[in-house]
Image: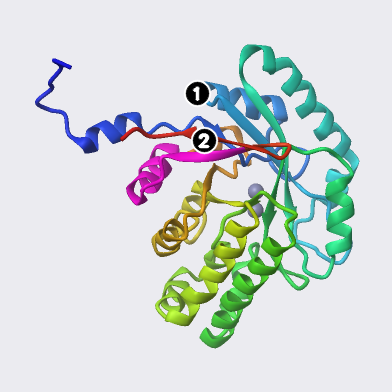
Amino acid sequence: MGYYDATFTPFTFLREHAMIRVDLHTHTNHSHARDSVRQMFEAGQARGLVVQGFSEHSPRPEGYDYPEEYREHLAATFDQYLAEVTTLKEEQAPRGVDVLLGLEVDWLEDEVPYLRRMTAAHEYDYLIGGIHFLGRWGFDSSPDDWAKLSLEERFALYERYYRTMKVMAETGLFNIVAHPDLIKIFSVDDFHRWLERPESMDLVGDALTAARDAGMAMEISSAGLRKPCREIYPGPKILKLARALRLPITFASDSHATEQVAWKFDELARYAAAEGWRESLVFRRGVVTVMPFAED
Ligand SMILES: [Zn+2]
Ligand SMILES: [Zn+2]
């Protein structure tokens, strides 16, 4: 009371206070990222994170391959990933910094028993469900694959992607749905055209509703801004729909190098706050807490 600043506007207030202090999506040099667990953590500290979740890619069975494959390297060092994050977690807890052990699991629709076994083998704070494969095709690595597709084929893939997301959510295996419109990565204009159809939004809505009903959050990810689609995951139309469905959110940089940790989080905070969110979720071994990121 008594304080009045003539230059104050709700917008400037939001801009200055819309801080996000948690990044739940970081990779390490145990897969194809550049930097180590420790280096990624230090980068997060420099950016003011109080909760940092590691979400390394999951082991993947033979037959699901990227052109540049990291499977063998990951298999050889996966136990080290678990050990390094666990050590860091124990070391940082007394300082009030929360390091979380997570995993970004490649959703593979025909390998659900494998996924169940693999995720049950260790105790994770949380699991991110990431759709990068449709069938055996890793759709997010080669623009050339997409260049060959007709509009009709692209539309069919968008549709399949959201049907797949619904099935993934319904397993109840995951806490967070990763980059919820990654399928737009190499064909963003066509994807927006597809979203213009009411039946497309119905499919997206079905997938997001399944995620909400499974107790999941949807991540809002700055990674899309670094990719050819040049757009936050998810784009504005899906963000609005998620808000209407009261889907909780998490924040993600999907960082693969130190300079990407918490990258463009000021932009993510404004993006989410403009739709009405004021907090994001944190998952710790089945316990869910909320963290405010903006003030009214
Ligand atoms: Zn991913
Ligand atoms: Zn990722």
Q: Is residue 87 visible?
A: yes
* Cβ at disc 1 under 8 Å from ligand 2: no
**In which quadrant of the rendered view does residue 283 lie?**
top right
SS category of the residue bearing label 2: loop
Is residue 187 or residue 122 the one in the foreground? 122
Question: Looking at the picture, does residue 35 appear above or below residue 185?
Answer: above
Residue 250: x percent and y percent? 54, 44
Q: Residue furthest top?
A: 94
Magenta stretch, overall SS: helix
Question: Looking at the picture, does residue 116 appear above or below residue 41?
Answer: below
Q: Are marks 1 and 2 in contact (CB under 8 Å)?
A: yes
Task: Sort mark 1 into few (<14), some (14-19) or many (20+) by Cα contacts within 10 Å.
Answer: some
Q: Which residue is mark 2?
A: 262
Q: Residue at x 50, y 26 (%)?
A: 47
Q: Quadrant of the C terminus?
A: top left
SS category of the residue bearing label 1: loop
Q: Residue at x 61, y 59 (%)?
A: 213
Residue 202: x percent and y percent? 49, 76
**In which quadrant of the rendered view does residue 185 lie?**
bottom right
Residue 137: x percent and y percent? 73, 71
Q: Which residue is mark 1?
A: 48
Q: Residue at x 78, y 71 (%)?
A: 136
Task: Give the left or right position of residue 202, taking residue 173 as reference.
Answer: left
In this picture, which residue range is highlighted in magenta?
Answer: 265-282
